[in-house]
Image (spheres, rainbow, N blue to C red):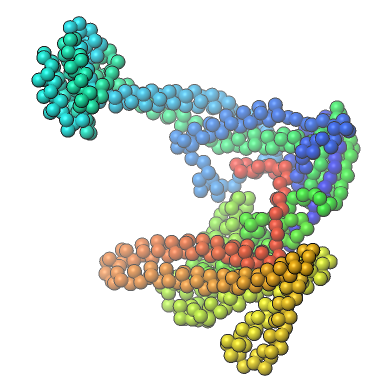
Amino acid sequence: MAIVKMNKFSLLVFERDKDKLLKNIQDFAEVQFIDLQENYEEYTEEGLLKVSENKKISHLESQKAKVKFSIEILQKYGAKFGGFKDIIKEKRIVSYNEFEDLIKDINWKEIYDSIKEKEDKINYLINENSKLQSDIDNLIPWRNLDISTKELDSLKTVKYVLGSAPKALKEKLREEVESKVKENYIEELSEIKNDANYLIIFKNDSIEEINEILKKYSFSKVNLNYDEAPYKLIDKYEKNIKENSLQRGKLIDEIMGYKETIEDLNISYEYYENEIAKIKSNNNFLKTNTMVAIEGWMPEGKKDDLVGVIKTNIGNDYYIKFTEPSEDDDVPILLENNGLAEPFESITSMYSLPKYNEIDPTPLLMPFYLLFFGMMLSDAGYGALMLIVTAVALKILPKDYENRKMIKLFFYLSFPTILWGVLYGSYFTGAINIPPLWLKPEENANLILFVSIAFGLIHVYIGLGIKGYLLIRNGKYLDAFYDVGLWFITLTTVIVYLAGSFANITALQGSLNIIKYIMFAGMIGLILTQGRENKSIGAKLGAGLYGLYGITGYIGDFVSYSRLMALGLATGFIGGAINLIIDFLGGGVKAWIFGPIIFIAGHIFNLLINALGAYVHTSRLQYVEYFGKFYEGGGNSFDPLKYKNKYIKIKTE
């Protein structure tokens, strides 16, 4: 249960063997390459050149993009893949050679060409309909105009205007046009929202009078450049839209004729992802005219296996050297824990992976995570429901399902949830009346608060103890005393002194003076040592006083553990409210119909919302109050070249 020890290797192989070797290293799945090209300048004097496969990568990326396009179009129009049946279905297991043969039998290019052609036609029809609908929207106000603007333009002795004016002014507009302009024709064609739309015809010599009147009434002119009357055009365009929509529907049906190929397309997509990952590895290497230089990381225990892979595939035409990591190396992190602790690695990695010289905090956080989560959710009914659901999921889901570890995490968390529910006598928050094995939380909130802070004290003390262990392990004995021992002395004596002074604990009364002097000694020790890295005496004392001020942070830490009590009560109160609503229904048909619905929906909601709250707040207690005492983090995960097995399982040979 620790960080896996890593070895760095330096490997020289002939250029002719590189591609074959990469294929087998991908199959080996235990090697992360180091980017030698990042510091290329250091090797220029040795005549080394960059290995580049950008042209090949670009081609493969193009192929992958086409496959992805085909998948997305099929999914867009309703082809399903990745549903529950696909998740629980066992993946097909093949070797990589069989995988390559399988891809040769999938004619995805023909599928892509056909789908692309049809999708282009669909997009053309959509754009055409959009344009037609836009024209219809422009013509709607002029639907009652039974003549085209082309015919109006052909009139010799008269002119016309089409346009809109505020509806509130239409009577005044008509009256003024008819009274001031002789021989006119004004027709209101429609009313749209707050505007009235007009056709006004007048003699050529009346244009100035008309313009003055229209300007006065905020008249907006409209130009309709169509050869046919608006109503004819609207009917024509609507007919065209219907025809285009029918054609679009036929094209979609033709595309959906390929829906049975979506699994093959997904497999093709995965093939290109694997190929691209393998070819991209070349961009880490340097070369001469005949040789390739490769460096990488691998688990220490896999050295012989790697040598075997190399020797099996390229014989003895290679040179390899293994070295231990140096202090300057950015060693990738791989965690290795037993079956119980492994699901909790997600909690550690969500915060930050440890650095190579740190310890893996996963086994150290696991017991507290179990304890705190169970205390926050604290209902035996909810825990039993979690247990059943997660156990069934673990039974039916494939072993390589990507979220299996998270499901297993909640499977383990269901046990302390049941335990705390039994201690509190909470079974669906009181729906089942069974006496508590310990106490009722709502009746003993102060005691639970005390227990919560006591757990917090243990949690923080263990965090400090781990810090002390790490300092001692690294030979920093005085630092361990200054930064851990003095805090243990100070915090413990402060707590004991306050308990003896304010809680009137008889056993402590005779020792309070001694405890007080030890407490002051611890505080003075902190003042004198917490600023020891500074140069001047004033700076040392100032930093020491500030370090002592950190005791307020510890007080805040202890108070944070009150959430163990608060969230446990919240689970019970929300669930109790749901049960109370059901009680208000009384008896009869109403209770029989709505009671089960409210019970199921309400308690599922309460379980989900409080399980989420317990997950978040338990994580926070680990990250802030616990990790803050001893853990730095900042490591990068071990990311070896290996197969992606989302749609098909590639077996290693």
Q: Toward the viewer: 561 or 542?
A: 542
- Residue 383, placed above or below residue 334: below
Q: Is residue 36 left or right of residue 242?
A: right
Residue 295 appearing in the image:
yes
Give the quadrant of the C terminus: top right
Give the residue at x 28% y 71%. 587
The x and y percentages for residue 350 are 62, 55
Q: Is 474 in front, or is 605?
A: 474
Q: Is residue 10 left or right of residue 159?
A: right
**Residue 285, position in %: x, y?**
79, 36
Q: Quadrant of residue 64?
A: top right
Residue at image x 62%, y 37%? Answer: 270
**Quadrant in the rendering for residue 450:** bottom right
Q: Residue 132's x, y, as percent?
A: 34, 23
Q: Which residue is drawn at the image coordinates 84% and 45% (left, top)?
A: 9
The structure residue drawn at horizontal position 63% and vertical position 50%, both measured from the top left corner, is 400
Q: Name the side, left or right, on which 423 lies relative to 228.
A: right
Q: In this view, does 152 lie above or below 452?
A: above
